Amino acid sequence: MADRWILRLDGTALPEKTLIGGKAWSIARMRALGLAVPPAFVVTTDACREYLSSGSIPSDLEQELDAGIEWLESGTNRRFGSSESRLLLSVRSGAAISMPGMMDTILNLGMNDEAEMALARESGLPAFARDTHRRFLELYSNIVLKTPIGEEGSDVNPASLRERIRDAGHDMPVSPRAQLSHAIAAVFGSWNSRRARRYREHHNIPHDLGTAVTVQAMVFGNLDDNSGTGVIFSRNPLSGERTPYGEYLPRAQGEDVVSGRFTPQSLDSLRISAASVHSELLAATNLLEKEHADIQDIEFTVQEGRLYLLQARSAKRAPNAAVRAAVEMVAEGMISIDTALSRVTSEQVRSMLFPRLAEGADRDATVLARGEGACPGVASGVFVHEADEAERRAAKGEAVILVRKTTSPDDIHGMIAAKAIVTEQGGSTSHAAVVSRALGRPCVVGVGSVSALRPGVMGTVDGGGVVYAGSLPVEAPDEEHDPHLRQLIEWARVRSPVAVLRPSGAHEIGDRRSDYVDLDAQLTAVDNSSLAAVLKGMKTARGAILATPEAARQAAACGVKTIVTEPVLPALLAMLGAKS
Amino acid sequence: MDERDLVLHGLAIKRHATAAAVADAIGLTEGAVSASLARAVAANRAMEVDGAYVIAPLAGLALEARYGLHFGALREDAGFCRAYAAFERINRTLKNVITDWQTMDVRGTRVANPHTDKEYDASIIDRLATIHEQIEPVLAQLAQRLQRLGIYARKLQAALDAAEDGEPEWVSDIRRDSYHTVWFELHEELLRIMGRIREE
């Protein structure tokens, strides 16, 4: 009998995203590729529209849910709501277009006192079972009942949490089946949350699209010694090297990896303990990278010797990894040159070319202070302890380093004027850290005492976290010396509407012509706000400022055809309309 | 607070600001603020460079000395203090969200967020919106005792709306009234009202 409201994600069909939402769609796609994903079904957007118009869950949906649960049970050899091997579920919203204001994921649905005991016996970890129970109650209360009751990290017992929910005037269903119906209704209801409506109105998304609900079996990586959890990257996300890189934690759940309470092992430990799972994982990783043509970041769990892929997405990566992978994937025939260029931003290239201390420069240097590096880069200047003074001296052309106990909005003009910033107090989330990153100024925070940074004395700040005495030699890496950057420059030059040349190869260009301007030779400093006026009518422009993507874009908009600056790649990428 | 001190107070929070920016911050007309700033400059209580004003150091100290007089009742008000404490609690989360907006964790290494991953950015703006939902009742409580503070709720909402509508610069850009800029000015305002010193 064909279901009316539910689709089983068994990989035999790939329904429209508008019907099943983005999340279910990617599960269906992974199943279709033959990959092991925890069994799941989806309640379609048709059911949502029916719910929104009638105000209640259609009665035949309840029957279909029963059948869907049975299907999940047979796929997992577990039972929802009874027996020793408990089936627990995750419930998530999923519209064709992701939008704010939609309901968050509920994990471990089906949990109650009996399920807690069953999970404790099965895993031999009563504390874990208790914690799972508590977190489920918190999530359910927070998300479905919209009544936050939990205190993070506390070890309140479930009975008193239920009492608190009752006291707040809500009914916390004990029956797993009732929990599921309420959760699905809550997802449907969130479609009409104020934020979701506002977002749709602004983006011209019809209000009657509706959201789907994905219901998926939970898997546990801590049930026995043949279980575990981990992450794998199809390439190293720090270097870009084409070697799968990952971490594995035997007998653990995903949150154990995130919490940092346990030290994960390398993937080799999985290869040694379960060679077939390891090779299945590598094959899946390879397949997913080919399918998405990008570096994949994959979360997986091994439950009782069986591999399950939980999530695969494009990996976050460090700038050099972005550059290397983009170039190498073109050579591998995986992506086009245009795609490669779109995957590298001007800012990423600039950060790879940040000045750094010259080789050996720190060997005999005196360290004046150490703290937490908040923004990378190296700069030298005179220590100045007041923002007003920093601004005054910088205006006269002096390089200054702003040193403060902490910074506040009062200090922003001084931070803009300074070459680098040092604070006595604060961590990576402090105001100084936030503002320095926004400005791209090397910054060290929380050095403890700034007494060694005496006003008027010259010093050097290494944004990695050290302040040195004196002006140390710095060197800026040359884009031409990096084979991957050189390749990107070559590709970008062919595609850029504006020629971008290095000064060393362009001594004569534009000289003595009326449509040529050298910005570095202007009497008053040119900044982004005065740039358009200076560039008007010019065909060729030279100047350091043009290496920044904003200035380069402005130059192109003013009709400039040739830019002479260094480095060239950030400007070239900006010309391509590359995201930056 | 009388108009003279209110304008100086606005100037202390928005340093190097035009009369228009100060007026916007404290909810007076630009004309009134311009006139007041002109008097402040004449009396050496403020300085002007290219249309931007700064409070004179001594005038700043004198203003802070008068805060006890202006805000003494608020500092004793249990409801206001509770709301202030709630702000400080939420402030810790806000700082983490802004840091996650600017930087990402790549296997234990923080790297700058290149803003190429729309999903990642959307998830952060989503967290910002959750913070906003938490701060709204707090701002309402603050504004109940000091009506002028309602301006911050309006500006925060505007920044969040712009960020959600696809202009991510409104999250933390320091050269506009981004969410972070307004939040920080609000924090500065509350610290001054309460007579506290910023911890970091």
Image (spheres, grey):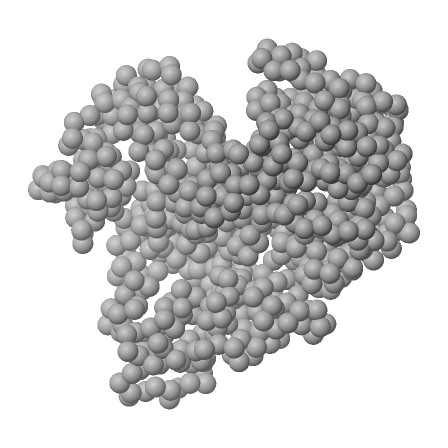
Residue B200 lies in what quarter of the image? Answer: top left
Tell which of A205 and A277 is nearer to you.
Answer: A205
Residue B192: x and y in percent read: 31, 29
- Residue at the image position 27 percent from the left and 48 percent from the top: A388
- Residue A309, given in percent of the width and then of the height, sits at 78, 47
- Position of A379 with respect to B111 (left or right) is left
Name the residue: 26% across, 54% down: A392
Image height check: is B56 above or below A546? above
Image quarter (top left, top right, bottom left or bottom right) of the N terminus of chain A: top right
Residue B61 makes an appearance in the image: no
Up the image or down, B166 lies above or below A58; here it is below
Question: Which is more toward the observer, A202 or B43?
Answer: A202
What is the x, y in percent for residue A137?
Answer: 67, 22
Residue A489 in the image: above or below residue A128: below
Residue at the image point whose x is 26% and y is 70% from the top: A533
Picture quadrant of residue A459: bottom left
From this view, report whether residue A572 is shown above or below residue A233: below
Tell me if A110 is positioned left or right of B80 in this view: right
**Does A3 sit left or right of B146 as displayed?**
right
- Res. A135 image quadrant: top right
Residue A148 placement (x, y as % from top left): 57, 22
Number of marks in picture: 0
Q: Is residue A29 visible?
A: yes
Q: Image point 42% across, 25% down: which residue?
A: B137
A371 horizontally vs B70: left or right: right
In the image, A468 versus B78, the foreground residue is: B78
